[in-house]
Amino acid sequence: MYNLSHRILGKYSLLPFFFSLFLLVILTKQAVADKTPLKIVATTGMIADVVKNIGGNLIEVQALMDSGVDPHLYRPTSGDIRALTQAEIVFYNGFHLEGRMQDVLKKMARSQATYAVAENVDAPLIYADDQVIDPHIWMDVSLWNKVATYVHKTLSKHLPESSNELNKNFQAYDAKLKQLHQQVIKQIASIPSKSRILVTAHDAFAYFGRAYNIQVVALQGINTADEFGLNDLIRIQNVIVKNNIKAIFLESSVPAKFMKSLQKGLIRKNVEVAIGGELFSDAMGKPDTVEGTYIGMISHNTKIIVRGLK
Ligand SMILES: [Zn+2]
């Protein structure tokens, strides 16, 4: 009698254990299902960085363009098309920054959640001419913060159940961007006003110039596909000589030879001008470096510009 009841009790005493195990498996499966990150593809590294900062662990983002890649000239590969097709959300800059991806992006927009971040920002824009809007809005941190706001709003729409986490991430990033904006204002203001002229390869810094009170002169227009000629070289040489500019700057996504030939031309005229360093204009630095983030890229540019012109 004792043995029998003991055996029955022993057998049933394992029930709560199996029930707990069963619950654990179900709950874990549920958690894994809930935590599957949303698949996002962004064209530029700058956009992917904003998405990463706000989406955190809720998303998985891939940038199509690596460091050093010029978005104006970039043509999508077959791997890019596959990634875009499989993405749950596609973010791109817009205003024709991705000039050679327009057809693909337009096609994507018909069947998938596709957003042009710059085109959805309520901000005073800069026109290169009557028709063409300058797409380089990330150069003004306060405008890029509006892109962060838009990305936050968009992700919240797609992940309503994670709004608390998204809000928290956004608030932290927003504070960092506000701080960065103030730092850039302060640092550029430390350059004497008569030396505050930024000479670069292509016209990517107009928003930077407007936000941080520095005159911007570029060899090429806002699109690196634009041609430039002898007249442009002479125009810039005159600005450099007239204003006694100490340094001109390279860009990581534009061949260095253009600015180097400008420098050589000036040396032949006995005008000394230094190459002040390399700026990140249309692409961030290498992954896993400080400059491989948006904040690091802007901080680097500011430091290089101040060091070259001061
Ligand atoms: Zn550009």
Image (cartoon, rainbow, N blue to C red):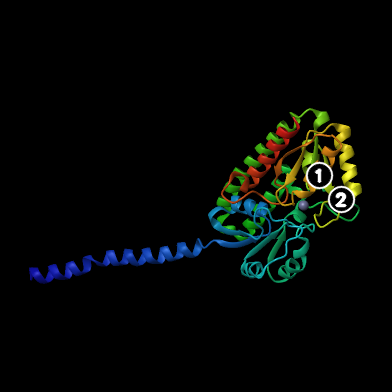
Q: Which residue is mark 2?
A: 128
Provide the residue designation for mark 1. Answer: 206
Q: Is residue 76 visible?
A: yes
Looking at numbered disc 2 in the image, what kind of residue is underneath it?
Ala
The image quadrant that residue 307 belongs to is: top right
Residue 143 in sight in this render:
no
Q: Position of residue 102 (x, y in %)?
A: 77, 65
| Residue depicted at 63% across the width and 57% down the height | 155
Q: Are the residues tagged 1 and 2 within 8 Å (C-beta)?
A: yes
Q: Position of residue 172 (x, y in %)?
A: 59, 43
Left or right, residue 89 beside residue 140: left
Residue 269: image quadrant is top right
For the residue pair 134 and 284, the one nearer the viewer reads as: 284
Mark 2 burial class by Cα count in 10 Å: few <14, some 14-19, many 20+: some
Numbered disc 1: secondary structure: helix
Residue at point 74%, 33% (across, down): 188
Task: State whether label 1 is within 8 Å of ligand 1.
Answer: no
User: Camera-side residue: 307 or 96?
Assistant: 307
Compared to 68, does 246 lie above or below? above
Q: Looking at the image, which residue is at 70% across and 71% down?
A: 111
The relative height of residue 289 versus residue 20 in the rendered view (above or below) is above
